[in-house]
C-alpha cells in the first residue's frame, strides 16, 4: 500500500512557538508510519520555512536550519521548492499538511488562506473558523448570537484606551466590577492575560494587553470550576467527556499551563450526568457556531449551582500526548495515534466537500 505523504508543519512566529514544537514532537512519534510518510517543515520565529528540521532538535537549538523552502501556489500542482535549488523528496510534492501551529499566523486563518489558495488539503478549521476562534471579541459576538451563556464583557480598542483612559476605567468598574480579566483579543495560551483586583491592577493589565493587540476584551470574573471538552468532527461533530483543570495559580495562565507542573487535570471531571450532557451539547454548538472543523477544545466555567458559562473555543489546542485535547479523547475511547489518523481523514473529507462547490458559472 502506498503511504500518503504528510507534511507536519510546526514552529511559527507567535509566542507559542515552543508549544508548537512540543505538539509536533508528539505527533511525529505517534503518527501511523504504515499509513503515512512524514516530512517535516519548521517555521522559524522570523518566518522562514525549513524543510527537514526535527522539532526535538529545535527545542534544544533554534539555530539549526534545514533546507529553506516555499510553497508553490499552483492549484493544479501544489508543491514545495528549495530556495537553494536542491532536490526535495518526491520533488516537493505531498498529499496533506498537518499544521500544529498555535497563535497568530498559525491558527488565526492566515495560513489556512494560504492552503486554500494553493488547493491543499489540511487538518483543522478553515479560514473563517480559525479567524473566529482566534478573535475573542468576534468569538463572543457569535456565541451571543448562538444563545450560549457567557460572562458579561466589554471590548475596548487600544486607540480608545489611549485617548480616554479614565473613561474606560470608569466604564469597566461600573459594568463589570472587580475582579475582572483583561485579555488581548487575538492571542492564545493566556499570553498577555491578567486578573485585575483594583484600579491600579486594571490600569496595568490594560496597558499589558494593549502591547499585544489593538482590541482588548475585559470579562467579569465568574467563580466556578474550569471545565474543558474536546470536539472532533466536521458537520457531524462529537464532544468528549469533560475534564477539569485545577490550576496551581490564581488562574490558568501561560506559566501554569506550560512551566509550573503544580496544575492538575482531572479526567473525567466529576459532574452530574445532566451537566455533562449539557456541556457536550454546548461544546458542539460552539464548534458549529464558529464553523470550526476537525478539532477544537471548548472551555467552560461551571458554578456551584451548576450554571454553565462558555469561556472560549480553541481551534488548534495543544496537541502533545499530555495535553488536555488528546487526553480527553483517550478517556473517551480514541487513542492518540488513532486521533491523528481521524484528523487527517476529516481534513481530506472537508477538502473533498469544499472542492465540490462551484465558485464561478
Image (cartoon, rainbow, N blue to C red):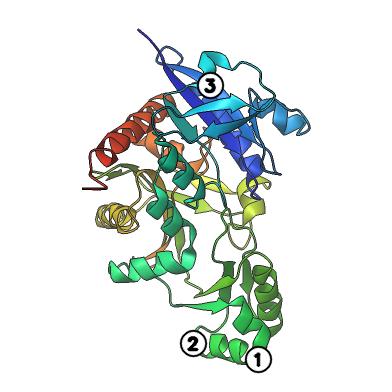
Which percent across, then down, holds residue 348? 33, 31
- Which residue is identified by label 3? 92
Rounded to the nearest angstrom, the CA distance separating label 2 from label 1 is 14 Å
- Which residue is identified by label 1? 166
The reply, left or right, for residue 151 in relation to residue 158 is left
Residue 285 higher or lower than 3, as above or below: below
- Is tag 3's residue or tag 2's residue first in the polypeptide sequence? 3
The reply, left or right, for residue 352 in relation to residue 92 is left
Rounded to the nearest angstrom, the CA distance separating label 3 from label 2 is 55 Å
Judged from this view, the residue extending furthest toward the left is 361
Q: Residue at the spot x=53%, y=17% of the render?
A: 91
Which percent across, then down, holds residue 304? 39, 67
Q: Secondary structure at mark 3?
A: helix
Which percent across, then down, holds residue 235? 24, 45
- Which residue is identified by label 2? 175
Q: Secondary structure at mark 2?
A: helix
Residue 241 higher or lower than 203, as above or below: above
The residue lying toward the viewer, choosing from 313 and 248, is 313
Q: Secondary structure at mark 1?
A: helix
Label 3 vs label 1, nearer the camera: 3
Q: Is residue 303 visible?
A: no
Amino acid at each position: 500500500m502506498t503511504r500518503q505523504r504528510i507534511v507536519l508543519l510546526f514552529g511559527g512566529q507567535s509566542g507559542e512557538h515552543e508549544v508548537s514544537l512540543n505538539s509536533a514532537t508528539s505527533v511525529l512519534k505517534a503518527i501511523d508510519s504504515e499509513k503515512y510518510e512524514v516530512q517535516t517543515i519548521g517555521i522559524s520565529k522570523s518566518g522562514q520555512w525549513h524543510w527537514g528540521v526535527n522539532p526535538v532538535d529545535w527545542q534544544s537549538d533554534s539555530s539549526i536550519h534545514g533546507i529553506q523552502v516555499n510553497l508553490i501556489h499552483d492549484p493544479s500542482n501544489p508543491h514545495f521548492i528549495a530556495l537553494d535549488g536542491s532536490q526535495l523528496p518526491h520533488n516537493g510534492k505531498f498529499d496533506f499538511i498537518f499544521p500544529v501551529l498555535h497563535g497568530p499566523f498559525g491558527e488565526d486563518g492566515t495560513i489556512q488562506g494560504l492552503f486554500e489558495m494553493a488547493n491543499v488539503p489540511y487538518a483543522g478549521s478553515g479560514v473563517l473558523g480559525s479567524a473566529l476562534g482566534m478573535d475573542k471579541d468576534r468569538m463572543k459576538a457569535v456565541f451571543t448570537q448562538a444563545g450560549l451563556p457567557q460572562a458579561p464583557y466589554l471590548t475596548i480598542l487600544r486607540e480608545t484606551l489611549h485617548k480616554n483612559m479614565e473613561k474606560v476605567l470608569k466604564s469597566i468598574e461600573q459594568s463589570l466590577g472587580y475582579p475582572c480579566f483583561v485579555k488581548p483579543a487575538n492571542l492564545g495560551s493566556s499570553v498577555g492575560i491578567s486578573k485585575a483586583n483594583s484600579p491600579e491592577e486594571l490600569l496595568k493589565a490594560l496597558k499589558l494587553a494593549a502591547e499585544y493587540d489593538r482590541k482588548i476584551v475585559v470579562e467579569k470574573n465568574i467563580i466556578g470550576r474550569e471545565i474543558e471538552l474536546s470536539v472532533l468532527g466536521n458537520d457531524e461533530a462529537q464532544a468528549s467527556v469533560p475534564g477539569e483543570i485545577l490550576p496551581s495559580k490564581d488562574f490558568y495562565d501561560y506559566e501554569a499551563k506550560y512551566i509550573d507542573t503544580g496544575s492538575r487535570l482531572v479526567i473525567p471531571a466529576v459532574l452530574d450526568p445532566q451537566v455533562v450532557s449539557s456541556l457536550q451539547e454546548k461544546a458542539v454548538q460552539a464548534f458549529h457556531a464558529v464553523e470550526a472543523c476537525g478539532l477544537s477544545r471548548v472551555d467552560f466555567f461551571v458554578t456551584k449551582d451548576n450554571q454553565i458559562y462558555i469561556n472560549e473555543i480553541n481551534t488548534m489546542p495543544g496537541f502533545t500526548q499530555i495535553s488536555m485535547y488528546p487526553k480527553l479523547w483517550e478517556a473517551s475511547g480514541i487513542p492518540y495515534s488513532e486521533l491523528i489518523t481521524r484528523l487527517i481523514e476529516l481534513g481530506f473529507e472537508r477538502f473533498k466537500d469544499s472542492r465540490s462547490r462551484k465558485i464561478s458559472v
